[in-house]
């Protein structure tokens, strides 16, 4: 480990989206000013490689920091500044950044894919506006997930099974997701989908991107039509948290060596359990509670929060 890594206590990851190709570095004056206000020294700044397929879409830097005093409230300050600058700023202890993660679990709808599948199904069933309004409130934590899910699901009764296949074939993939999953798997990190959505769509993502396993609600189909019910227990926030614990225990993985990523209120428990819990483009209640937030970059943003060998892994 080099000297910079030895004296650094924290790291700040800056992910700057860019809508047009450019080569100039972002203006980081406000970021440096905030660090100075807290009396934190910048030990070293490094550019972080971005996957080639995304190189024209963002600039990434990591700043290694030495904080001799307290850092209480600093992460929240960075969250506010990130919104002002419309960039992602993620403040981590070096111990979190250097950890050797072994398991990553992901919500599906509005995380791995850029839609809520139940809303897409509802639109095809002619009840899109009604279902979407309930979905939004449920994801904000304003409604009980199981009760609201059951209500929305009942509105899909009679929908043709062929519609499900059509939607599964055209899922809008979140930018950076393929690069993230490919890299995690190359690093030996197991990848799992934990979804309050439906098995057909999770299975399609597994087939395309190589997730080791998935857990999702199984739609009940009879005579080629959706019945408006699921088979088995509903995957809600409690179930996601329990599944994370069960999978980690079965694989002999400590929870501190896990990653959890999601956007909705039903993801909060698994995010809180994981060693690296990330709210991705999340609802306000999730952003306020999650240890780490990504809002302006793609899912590849998670990659830049993981340490490199040069950082003492």
Image (tube, rainbow, N blue to C red):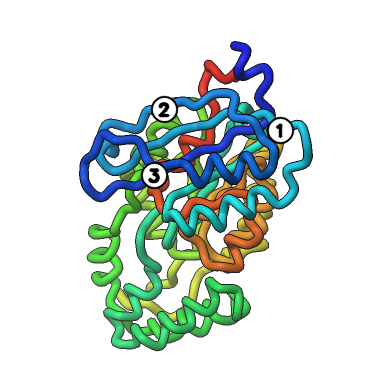
Asked if one can make out residue 251 in the rendered structure from this viewpoint, the answer is no
Relative side of 225 to 238, left or right:
left
Q: State how far apart marks 3 and 2 are (Cα).
A: 12 Å
Residue underneath mark 3: 16
Task: State the SS at label 2.
Answer: strand
Task: State the SS at label 1.
Answer: loop
Mark 3, other Cα within 10 Å: few <14 / some 14–19 / many ≥20: many
Task: State the SS at label 3.
Answer: strand
Q: Which mark is residue 47?
A: 2
**Residue beneath the point at 21% across and 47% down:** 20
Q: State how far apart marks 2 and 1 are (Cα).
A: 21 Å
Give the mark count.
3
Residue 41 higher or lower than 161, as above or below:
above
Q: Residue furthest right?
A: 69
- Sequence order check, earlier mark of 3 and 2: 3
Residue underneath mark 1: 67
Please state the horizontal and vertical placement of residue 166, each as a whole percent of the image.
23, 65
Specify the quadrant that holds the N terminus: top right
- Sequence order check, earlier mark of 3 and 1: 3
- Judged by depth in the image, the label closer to the viewer, 2 or 1, is 1
Please state the horizontal and vertical placement of residue 152, each as a whole percent of the image.
46, 82
In terms of image quadrants, where is residue 115? Answer: bottom left
Asked if one can make out residue 283 in the rendered structure from this viewpoint, the answer is yes
Mark 1, other Cα within 10 Å: few <14 / some 14–19 / many ≥20: some
């Amino acid at each position: 480990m080099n000297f910079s890594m030895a004296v650094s206590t924290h790291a700040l990851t800056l992910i700057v989206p860019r809508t047009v190709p450019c080569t100039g570095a972002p203006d980081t004056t406000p970021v440096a000013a905030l660090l100075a206000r807290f009396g934190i020294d910048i030990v070293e700044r490094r550019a972080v490689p971005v996957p080639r397929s995304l190189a024209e879409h963002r600039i990434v830097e990591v700043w290694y920091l030495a904080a001799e005093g307290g850092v209480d409230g600093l992460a929240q300050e960075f969250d506010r500044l990130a919104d002002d600058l419309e960039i992602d700023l993620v403040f981590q202890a070096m111990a979190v950044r250097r950890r050797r993660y072994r398991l990553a679990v992901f919500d599906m709808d509005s995380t791995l894919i850029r839609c809520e599948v139940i809303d897409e199904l509802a639109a095809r069933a002619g009840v899109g506006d009604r279902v979407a309004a309930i979905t939004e409130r449920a994801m904000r934590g304003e409604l009980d997930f199981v009760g609201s899910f059951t209500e929305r699901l009942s509105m899909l009764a009679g929908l043709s099974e062929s519609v499900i296949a059509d939607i599964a074939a055209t899922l809008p993939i979140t930018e950076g997701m393929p690069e993230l999953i490919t890299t995690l798997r190359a690093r030996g990190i197991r990848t799992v989908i934990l979804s309050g959505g439906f098995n057909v769509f999770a299975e399609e993502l597994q087939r395309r991107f190589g997730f080791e396993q998935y857990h999702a609600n199984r739609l009940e189909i009879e005579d080629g039509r959706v019945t408006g019910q699921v088979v088995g227990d509903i995957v809600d926030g409690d179930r996601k948290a329990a599944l994370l614990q069960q999978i980690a225990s079965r694989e002999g993985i400590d929870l501190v060596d896990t990653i959890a990523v999601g956007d909705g209120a039903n993801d909060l428990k698994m995010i809180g359990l994981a060693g690296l819990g990330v709210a991705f483009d999340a609802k306000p209640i999730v952003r306020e509670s999650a240890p780490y937030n990504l809002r302006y970059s793609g899912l590849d943003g998670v990659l830049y929060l993981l340490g490199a060998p040069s950082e003492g892994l």
